[in-house]
Each structure stands twice: as structure tokens, then as C-alpha cells.
Image (tube, rainbow, N blue to C red):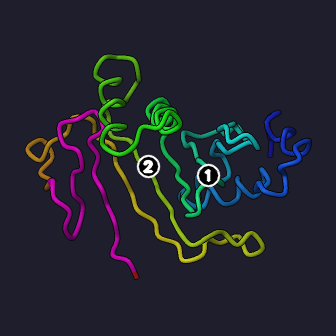
Amino acid sequence: MRMTFACLLFAASPLLADMPTPAHQIASSVQAAPEELRAEATVLGYDPSGSVVVLREGANDLNCLADDPRNESFSVACYHKDLEAFMARGRELSEQGYKGKERHQVRWKDVDEGRVKMPREARILYVLTGKGYDSANDEVLEPYLRWVIYTPYATPESTGIPAKPGPGPWLMYPGTAGAHVMISPPTP
């Protein structure tokens, strides 16, 4: 397992006790990915300053993002590497204080105007939430996995997928750069 220089920052930081280790961030973040893709996924995590850094360079097309230790809830995600510019812009806007619909609209405009690259082909995002991560047993506590398939500018007419939540897949933000199919299994 190859780790980048960012991992060394953790060892030198006095905030280490408050931060999950890079190994912990890697192990927990890849839980969102299909098992056969986990070992070779690139992993992004957080350094003690809260900046996103590369914890592990991967060898496949998947990027995984560790849980943000500044948030109480547990949420990790893995997505096709072609979505990185779009995801990075979303993180940047969040850091600037943009939230909700306003954050989405700024990011979509960035795509529309060519400032942020967004693939036109469908790309997947796996989102895993839970009550926390048990590193001793390598498991997410009360896990809930949902799938998001980005299909920029898709509409109900172009896909045959309804734009209202209900049982089964539905299309969120139809007609926008951020259009995506939501697939959320029933909660246990």
C-alpha cells in the first residue's frame, strides 16, 4: 500500500488524537465501494487542518472520500474519477459557505460555462452512511448504502425515469448539469 506525503503530516501533527489516522480513513472510506474495487481505489481524506489530501494513489477508476471528521454524522463516498472536478468544486463551494440549492446552482453554472469538467456519460457515486465506523471489526455501524448515477442534463423524457421520489429509481435535478438517478433502498 503506497501512501503519499500527506500521510506524514498526521504523524507530526499535535491534532492526531482528534483525527482518524490515514489507515483508519482509508479502511472506512473504501467500505462504500464494491468489494472488488476497494484495494485499488484512490483515497482522499482529511489532514489535521481539514484540507482534503490524497491518502492513497489508486490503480483503478474509483476515488473514495473519507468521512469528514468535522461532522458528527458518518458518511463516506466513492465515485468514478471522471467526477472528481465536479466533486472538488462542490467541496470548495461548501468551504466558502454555499449550501443547498445555491451550492448546486453555482456548480451547475460552472459546468454549463466550461469552468468545471463534467462527463456526459453516466458515472456512479456510492454513498455509505451510518452511526460510525468500528475499526477493530472493519465495519460501518448501522450502514446504509445508496447509489447515485450522474447523467448530466437527463430528463424524465430522455430516460423514462420519473422525477419524483418513490419506490425505485428517480431522477433528481432533471435537465441540469447535476442530473442524477437516485437509487435508495428501503431503510431497515
- Left or right of 71 on screen, residue 154: left
Q: In this view, does 1 lie to the left or right of 40?
A: right
Q: Is residue 129 magenta?
A: no
| Magenta residue check for 171 | yes
Where residue 164 sits in the image (x, y, percent)? 16, 58
Q: Is residue 140 above or below residue 72?
A: below
Name the residue carrying label 2. 125
Query: Horizontal and vertical percent for residue 158?
Result: 12, 41
Q: Give me the C-alpha separation between circle 2 and circle 1.
A: 17 Å
Above or below, 152 relative to 36: above
Q: Is mark 2 on a helix, strand or loop?
A: strand
Q: Which mark is residue 68?
A: 1
Place residue 146 in its image quadrant.
bottom left
- Residue 7: image quadrant is top right
| Residue 97 coordinates in the image, percent (x, y) | 47, 38
Q: In this view, does 89 lie to the left or right of 71?
A: left
**Residue 2 figure quarter:** top right
- For marks 2 and 1 on the same chain, the one whose residue lies earlier in the sequence: 1
Residue at position x 41%, y 47% in the image? 124
Q: Which mark is residue 87?
A: none
The stretch in magenta equals: 163-187
Amino acid type, residue under disc 1 in the picture:
Asp
Q: Residue furthest bottom?
A: 188
Is 136 or 33 nearer to us in this picture?
136
Q: Position of residue 184 (x, y in %)?
A: 33, 65
The secondary structure making up most of the magenta span is loop
